[in-house]
Image: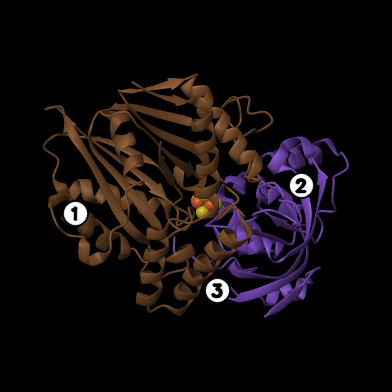
Chain colours: A purple, B brown
Amino acid sequence: MELATPLSSRTLENLRCGQEVFLTGVVYTARDQAHVRLAAALRRGAKLPFELKGSIIYYCGPTGTPKGKVIGSCGPTTSRRMDALTPLLLSKGVAAMIGKGNRSSEVRRAIKRHKAVYFVACAGCGALISTYVQEASVVAFNNLGPEAVQRLRVERLPLVVAIDSRGKSVYKD
Amino acid sequence: MRSIPSRKITDAVSRLCMQANFELRRDVLRALRRAQAAEKNSRARRMLEAIVTNAAVARRERLAICQDTGLPVVFVELGQDARVAGDLKKAIVKGVEEGYRKGCLRDSIVGDPLKRGRPGFTPPVLHIDIVPGNKITLAVLPKGFGCENKTQLAMFNPTASWRRIKDFIVGAVKAAGPDACPPYVVGVGLGGTAEYACLLAKKALLRKIARPRLQGAGSTRRLEKELLAAINKLGIGPMGLGGATTALAVSIGTYPTHIAGLPVAVSISCHALRSAKATL
Ligand code: SF4
C-alpha cells in the first residue's frame, strides 16, 4: 500500500498491524538527545524546530554524508529508548513514528489513545534505506552531531505497521 | 627484533575500519543466504533478502552497512619479537579517527558516560595481547550498541546444570527479542573471571561462521548446535517479525575457571556483524 504525507486521520486509522506500506513524503529524525530537548522545549513552552502536529518522527542518527550523496547510511535505531518521552510527543500531535523493535505497554496505550501508528523500517539496512532518501537538511540541534534533527524527504520507503491505531502489535510480548 | 613503524599500524587500522563497515563479512553473508534459502516464512525471506541487498549496496557505494558504525573494538596481537617504532596505542586511535572520518562513518562516541557531550570518533576499546612471533595482528570489530545493550553476564554455581546455563543463554536472546536487529550471532563466554567471560564472548564473534557440514565436531561445537536449535525455536525471526531464523550462529569461547564458580557471558551481535583483520 502507498502512503503519502501528511497522513490523514482516516489513513492512520485504516492501517493494520503487520501491513506493509511504502511511505512518500517528509519525516523528521529525532533520537535520544533530540527527544530530551524537544520535551524540555515543550515544558518551557518554547518554539519547536518543526511542527509536531501531524508529523512523522524517525528514530535515526545517520552517518556523515559522503561526497555526492544525499545522506549517508540511515537506518532506524532501537525505539524502546524513546519510550519514556513518546506519550508526551503523541499528546502534542505526532502522527506516526518509525523505528525498530518493540515498545512499552504505555506507548502502546498512548498510540491507541491518540490514534497514531508505529512503523518499523528495515533494521540494520542503513545503506539500502539511504537510497530512498531524496532530500536531507538539518533543522535543529546541529551541535548534537548525528543526533541532530533532520528533515528528510523519502520516496517509497518500505515500512511495516508494527503497532496500529487500535494498539494492536505485530510482536508477541 | 623486527621494527614496525607506527604509521603502518595507523594506516592498517584506518583501512580495517572502513573495510569492516562497508563490506559485510563473507561468512556472515553466506549464513544469511543459507538462512534465506531455508526460511519457509515469506516475510522472513524478504527481510533476509533486504539484508543481503543492503550489504551489496554498502559494498558498491562505500556506504556504512549500518548507520550505527559502532564503538570500534580493536583486538591487537603483538608478537613479542616485534617492536613498534612510535606509540602503539596512539597509532591505533589515530587510525580509527582517520578511517572513520574518511569513510564518513558515524561519530558515536561521547567523552564522558554521564556528562555525554558532543560525540566524536574515538577512543576505541583496545584489547592487547602478547603472542609469540614478530608480527602484529589487528582486528577491528565495530560493535553496534543496539545489540551491545543486550549483553548479559551470570555467575553460576560450579554445580549448575547445563540445562540452567542453556536457559540463561537462550533467555538472553529472548530478552533481546525484536529490538537488536535479528537474526543474531550469539557469542558465549564460559569460564575465566567475570570480565574475562565477557571478553571470551566478544572474541567469539570474531570467529568465522562455519558451513553446517563443517560444524558439529568437538563438544563445544555440539553445544553451539544445541543452543542454535533452541534459539531458532523462539520464533523471533528476521527483524523480529517472525520466522525460523532468530540466530545465524552461536559461537562459544571457553577458558579454565575457579573451583567455586562458572561465569557465563552472552554477547549478542546483530546481523550486521562486522569485523576485519590484518597481519603486519
Ligand atoms: S543493532 Fe546492529 S544492525 Fe541494528 S542498528 Fe545497531 S549496529 Fe545497526
Q: Amino acid at mark 2?
A: Val
- SS label for mark 1: helix
Tag 2 residue: A149
Which one is closest to the eye, mark 3 or mark 2? 2
As drawn, A100 above or below B126 = below
Q: Position of residue A138 (x, y in %)?
A: 81, 47
Q: Is mark 3 within 8 Å of ligand 1?
A: no
- Which chain is indicated by disc 3? A
Question: Is the same chain shared between marks 3 and 2?
Answer: yes
- Which chain is indicated by disc 1? B
- SS label for mark 3: loop
Tag 1 residue: B221
Measured in 3D between alpha carbons, the distance from the residue under mark 1 to the one under mark 2, in whole angstroms, is: 46 Å
The crowding category of the residue bearing disc 3, from other C-alpha atoms within 10 Å (few below 14, some 14 to 19, many at least 20), is: some
Measured in 3D between alpha carbons, the distance from the residue under mark 3 to the one under mark 1, in whole angstroms, is: 37 Å
Measured in 3D between alpha carbons, the distance from the residue under mark 3 to the one under mark 2, in whole angstroms, is: 28 Å
Q: In what quadrant of the picture does the C terminus of chain B appear?
A: top left
The crowding category of the residue bearing disc 1, from other C-alpha atoms within 10 Å (few below 14, some 14 to 19, many at least 20), is: some
Question: Looking at the rendering, which quadrant does residue A13 occupy?
Answer: bottom right
* Name of the residue lying farthest toward the right: A47
Choose between A126 and B98: the one closer to the eye.
B98
Tag 3 residue: A18
Q: Position of residue A36 (x, y in %)?
A: 70, 38
- Which chain is indicated by disc 2? A
Question: Would you say the residues marked 1 and 2 are in contact, meaning their CB atoms lie under 8 Å apart?
Answer: no
Q: Position of residue B105 (x, y in %)?
A: 62, 45
- SS label for mark 2: strand
Q: In percent of the image, x 36 and y 70: which residue is there?
A: B34
The crowding category of the residue bearing disc 2, from other C-alpha atoms within 10 Å (few below 14, some 14 to 19, many at least 20), is: many
